[in-house]
Amino acid sequence: METSQKSDDVLLEWLQLSRSENIGPRTFHRLLQRYKTPHNALRALPELASRGGLKRSLKIASLLDVEKELHTTRNFGADIITMEDPLYPPLLRHIDSAPPVLTVKGKRDLLQAPLFAIVGARNASAMGKKMAYQLAQSLGQQKWVIASGLARGIDRAAHQGSLPQGTVAVLAGGIDQIYPAENKELYEHIGETGVLLAESAFGVQPQSTLFPRRNRIISGISRCVLVVEAALKSGSLLTANYALEQGRDVFAIPGHPLDPRAQGCNKLIKNGAVLVEKIEDIQRELVSFAPINIKEDCCISHEPIQPSSLESTRSRIKENLNYAPISIDELIRECQLSTSDVWSVLLEMEIAGCLDRLPGGKVALKQEWKS
C-alpha cells in the first residue's frame, strides 16, 4: 500500500508538470533533463517563466485538479502511465515530442507488440476500405498489432480487420471522447479487446489542433505506416511525414491520378515509399528491415545555471529573434554563444509562452507575445 501511494505521488507530479501552462512534451523533456524530476522542475517553473519575460504568474496545474483527473480516469476503467512505465510504447519513448503521460484503456500489453499503422481518407472509396480491412487482417494474422486513429473510412476498416488479433486506437480527445459518434460500438469493442490511447486529459473534446498531435503518436508507436488513400493536404499524409521524420518505413497504395484521394499516396511513392498492391509487397520489405536509428536529445546542460550569468545572453538572443523562423543552430552562430546557454534561455522563453518551436529545429517569437 505504501509503495502504491509513493507511485501515485510520483505520477501526480508528472501530471502536474505536463498539465501546466506552456509545458508541451519537448519543454517537459528539457525540464526533466535539467532538473531530474518533475518535483524539482515544478519548483523551478515560476522563476523560469519570470526570467523568460512572463509578467504574471504562470498557471501551474493544482494537485487537486490532477488528483481528480487520476480518480476520474481510473473510475472509467482506464489508467495513466508515464514514460517511465515499462508498458509505455517503446518506440514512442524515443521521438523528440513523446507524450510524458498517456491515458490507456484495454489490454496494455499490446503496446509492447510490433505495431503497424494503417491510415487513410475519411471519405474513402469502397475498394480502399476493403483493401485496408484485408491488409489489416493479414498483418494481424502475422502477429502485427494494427494502430490507427478511429476515424471514419480507412481507419475504421483497419481497426475492424484487426479486431481479432488486437488493435490500438489513438484518440485526439480524452480517453472518454468517442469521435465520430458512429464509431461508438467499435470504440467499446477496442476498449475491451484492444487498446484505447489518448494524450489529452480525461474529458477534453476533440478539436482541430489535437488531430496533428494524435497523428505523430500513431506513427510514433509504430514500426511501419501504410497509407491507403490520402489527399495531398490530409492528416494521413501528415502521419506519413511524421513517420519519415521518426525513421519509420512508409508504404502506400497507388491510385488513379484523377482521384484526389490517390494523389497523396502517389506522391509518397514518387518520394520513395514502398508501393503496395498486395500483402506480399509488404512481406517482402519486412524481411529486410533495418533497425530504427534512435536519436537521443542531449542539447540541454544538466549543470545548474545562475540567473545573473545569462542576462547579456538573454538580451543578445532576444535581439536576434523575430516572428520569422530561425534555426537554433543559426541562432547560436549569430549570437556567438555557447549551445547550453542558448538552450537555457530558449527554455525560459518557452515556459513564458513567448516562443514557438517549429519543425526542422526552428524557433520564432509568438505573434501574440508582448514583452
Image (cartoon, grey):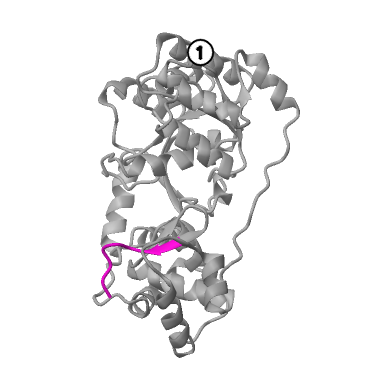
Residue 127: horizontal and vertical position, in percent?
45, 9
Residue receiving disc 1: 131
Residue 364 drawn in magenta: yes
Which span of residues is magenta-colored? 363-371
Task: Look at the magenta stretch and give its main secondary structure.
Answer: loop
Q: Is residue 312 above or below residue 67?
A: below
Residue nearer the viewer, 148 or 197: 148
Mark 1 belongs to which amino acid?
Met
Q: Is residue 69 above or below residue 356?
A: above
Residue 249 drawn in magenta: no
Q: Quadrant of residue 258?
A: top left
| Crowdedness near tag 1: few (<14), some (14–19) or many (≥20) residues, C-alpha within 10 Å | many
**What residue is at 43 percent from the left and 87 percent from the top?**
311
Residue 49: horizontal and vertical position, in percent?
35, 74
Q: Residue furthest right?
A: 288
Q: Is residue 318 left or right of residue 209?
A: right
Q: Is residue 6 visible?
A: no
